[in-house]
Amino acid sequence: MRSLISVAYFSLALIVITAIAARPTGPFVLVITSPAGDVAGSMSVIEKADGAFVWSGSVPWMSVAYSQAPDFSERLLEAGALLVINHDLAIGCQQGMNS
């Protein structure tokens, strides 16, 4: 029973740390849209949120967007994004794909 409780606490701590690291900060964010969509769909979501498209890698439903607006992440979600996270995660993905 103790090991089960320890695993539960560890899992909860890991989720909290991941959520903090993924929280969007600054003007650049990683925008996740529907995996069934294409780059044009991602660009449309970013445009509806009054942002600028910056980059898209090998998967068209993941894009980096830019805006100075403090509520940009919320506007992206309202425009159809499934998830908006810290753009530093995109840089890590890009480096992993290039190695």
Image (cartoon, helix red, strand yellow):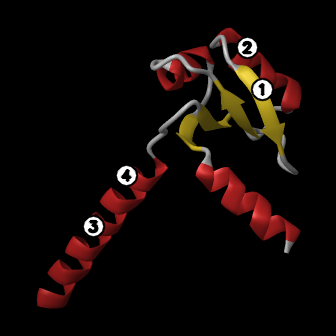
Q: Quadrant of the C terminus?
A: bottom right
The first of marks 3 and 2 along the sequence is: 3
- Residue 47's disc number: 2
Depth check: 19 or 70 in front? 70
Query: Dot 2: few (<14), some (14–19), or many (≥20) neighbours within 10 Å?
Result: some
Which three-letter amino acid code belongs to the residue tagged 2? Glu
Place of residue 49 in the rendered image (x, y in percent of width and height, measured from the top left): 63, 13
Q: Report which residue position mark 3 lands on.
A: 13
Residue at the image point whose x is 19% and y is 89% from the top: 3
The first of marks 3 and 1 along the sequence is: 3
Q: Quadrant of the N terminus?
A: bottom left
Place of residue 4 in the rendered image (x, y in percent of width and height, measured from the top left): 20, 83
Place of residue 12 in the rendered image (x, y in percent of width and height, measured from the top left): 27, 65
Which three-letter amino acid code belongs to the residue tagged 4? Ile
Q: Report which residue position mark 1 lands on.
A: 53
Which three-letter amino acid code belongs to the residue tagged 3? Ala
Which three-letter amino acid code belongs to the residue tagged 1? Phe
Query: Dot 1: few (<14), some (14–19), or many (≥20) neighbours within 10 Å?
Result: many
Q: Are marks 1 and 2 in contact (CB under 8 Å)?
A: yes
